[in-house]
Image (tube, coloured by chain):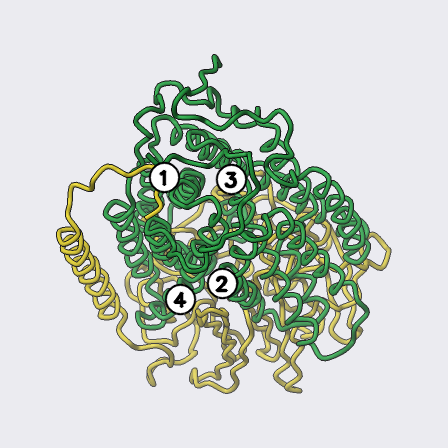
Amino acid sequence: MTARFPGPPNPLGPRARIAVLVAAVLLLAAGSVGYVLHSEARSDGQRGAADASFTLDGPALYFRDTATGRVAHQPLAGTRGDRTTGGPVCDRFHAAGGTALCLRAKPGVLPKTYAIVLDRRLREVRRITVPGIPTRARVSASGRMLAWTVFATGDSYATTAFSTRTAVLDLRTGYLIKSIEEIPLTIDGARHHAPDVNYWGVTFARDDNRFYATVSTKGRTYLVEGDMKNWSATALRQNAECPSLSPDNTRIAFKKKLSGDPAAPWRLYVLDLRTMREWPLAETRGVDDQAAWLDDGTIAYALPGAGGGRTSDIWTVPADGTGAPHKAVAGGSSPVAVG
Amino acid sequence: MYLATTGRRDTSAPPSTGGAGRRVPGTVLALGTVSLVTDISSEMVTAVLPLYLVLGLGLSPLQFGFLDGLFNGGSAVVRLLAGHAADRGHRHKRVAGIGYALSACSRLGLLLAGGAATGIAAALATDRIGKGIRTAPRDALITLSSPPDALGRSFGVHRAMDTTGALLGPLAAFALLGATADAYDAVFVVSFCVGLLGVLLLVLYVPGHRPAPSTPVSTPRTGKAFGALRDPAFRRIVAAAALLGAATIGDAFVYLLLQRRLNLPVGWFPLLPLGAAACYLVLAVPAGRIADRAGRRLPFLYGHLALLAVYTVLLAPADGPPLLLLVPVLALLGVFYATTDGVLMALAGSVLPPDGSAGGLALLQTGQALSRMLAAAGFGAAWTVWGPRPALWAATSVLLAALAGGWALLPRTASDAPGSAEPPGDQNPERRTA
């Protein structure tokens, strides 16, 4: 033994130390195993498909039920509590025109996302696996165009900052664009070339060709208008994220960053595409969601629940900036009106 | 009695004749086990944290980045204070124990925080502070319990065990997530239990060092936290480490450059650090032993040549198979860490007085960490302005200059440092009025 300073004699002898260690290992292992088993029992083991009776039939408000992780629905003018559960397990959900898009996270050393395309009966018609963590999902009104965004770690300058990958899938042709980041982009009238472009939060117009999205580059975010046929994108204005086009295609609801407070940087705004005038909505809390239009006058979005943890509630607010937020669903996210 | 020969400057590290045959000190193995277990615990959480925050809690990446970057600078101050506190009266074990315990309890904090961002931020900050507190006292304990001519090997063994834990952690976490259908709380609970086990191992098996009876405890040589800097040899080591740190752009950028060069699928990204860590794990002990024989100065400098080689390989206009780029870069990164991390501690440990080792090592680690942070920030800015290749050329030239500086700065042998204080003789301890 070559210790410089002989340590003070340990009050416990070698055998006592072993005994204490073994006892502690047993205790801690029992605690761990017990908790893991309890967690296993808590998850009902049901991971995946919808019940046979659960279909895409409107008019109803579909959403992800945070308690079970499965899609549920309730009447659009629903009173809380009369929900029908039994949909597929999804982390993000959107549906329109008889097509549903379900993003399901598959954690692992390499986190993956399943983008699952479902038909009106909520049967799986196509599944695409992409690396990353799911964040946004949208289906165009006709059900033909699908877009989703995942966070991919480590693909950006800062180690801890995420970068995003946005894919577009045309169901009619089956053509998949894995990442739209190569689309020719024009900012302030000039072609923009930068390695750091990130797109997220696509929303499609009724013609299945025009789309809106957020692009971030050089530390700024822009609302871009894109064209699938011409394969081009143009920045319309700065500081507008996660656009959501109204059913009549005249207005866009979006997140505007107003404060540097990382806990609640965004407020919900609506932009009139004809006048380019924008106004804040009556929701004063910080919203981090791609809003959904329930009709031409109502916007729905998720906010973290009062219970904390992994719960969130769905709120609605008038689109014209009047009125007050109203809680539509307790314990839900990914709202979408299926007509 | 056998007293410390740390601080001995009369000879360079003697050739370790019996070094190969001698056993690694029990304390080092105990500390290695503690680190292995603790790293399993902490890497479990690190691996699932992005998923938990973004998916589980619906935090935005912006918030995640904010949380993650929290207290990175703040832990530097904690590190210095803890190093100093450990030296006062040789409380290395106690101070390190507090650090380990804080980190273990932070997992419970994550569990209790639920979705409250402030609670999560507090838990992450606690973990960082715990890590800041324990690192220097732990490395000082390794220094104090190893013969000076085998310091490099001791640090090599410790770092190898530490890295083993870091590799096992994510595997354990994802096995749990798979078994429990994404119950993140189960990961936190298990991580907490494993962390507690680490603390217990420290309490049971790491001896608390007592100062030599004749060394006065009341007046540590390091009157101030920066007292170690009064030693010119140590000053040169800190300066060289900071200088070379300022040319180290950081793994994240290396992996990013690799990924861009090879067009790797994004999903493979998390595997790159594992590759480098595996290489580090294999090489840590041999590098430490070579350092013990060759005097530590050269291995530390050659290690930075490995980093230079990484930059060069990344700049090379090679269009061969991807593995031709991937394997050398990850292997060279492993070499770089194996020959610099523990070796630097051994280099410093051999010139620091026993009652100033934790404070001195804390100072060294902080200086290196800060200059590396600056380097990463500078490289990021250069990348944004000039693009990746010119930025990499710049980093290469800075590293070449830093290598020349380090070559000149690093004391060739401990005795080269003129005017260094005489060793802390136990017969007539030097009293300085601070």
In depth, the one of B135 and B72 nearer the eye is B135
Identity of the residue drawn at 65% across and 71% down: B326
**Residue wearing tag 1:** A4
In depth, the one of B155 and A124 nearer the eye is B155
Q: Position of residue B411 (x, y in %)?
A: 65, 38
Residue type at numbered disc 1: Arg
Residue type at numbered disc 3: Ser
**Residue wearing tag 3:** B350
**Residue wearing tag 4:** A64
In the rendered structure, find residue B281 and report the number of the disc placed on it.
Answer: 2
SS class of the residue under badge 2?
A: helix
Is disc 2 in contact with disc 4, using a CB cutoff of under 8 Å?
Answer: no
SS class of the residue under badge 1?
A: loop
What whole-number distance in Å separates the C-alpha atoms at marks 3 and 4?
Answer: 61 Å
Pinpoint the chain carrying mark 2: B
In the rendered structure, find residue A139 and report the number of the disc placed on it.
Answer: none
Residue type at numbered disc 4: Arg
Pinpoint the chain carrying mark 1: A
The yellow chain is A
SS class of the residue under badge 4?
A: strand
Identity of the residue drawn at 69% across and 74% down: A207
What whole-number distance in Å separates the C-alpha atoms at marks 2 and 3?
Answer: 23 Å
Q: Position of residue B222 (x, y in %)?
A: 47, 23
Residues behind callouts 2 and 3 on a single chain: yes
Q: Position of residue A26 (x, y in %)?
A: 17, 61
The quarter of the displayed image where residue A74 is located: bottom left
Foreground label between 3 and 4 = 3
Is any atom of residue B280 visible in this view? yes
The green chain is B
Residue type at numbered disc 2: Leu
What whole-number distance in Å separates the C-alpha atoms at marks 4 and 1?
Answer: 63 Å
- The residue furthest top is B433
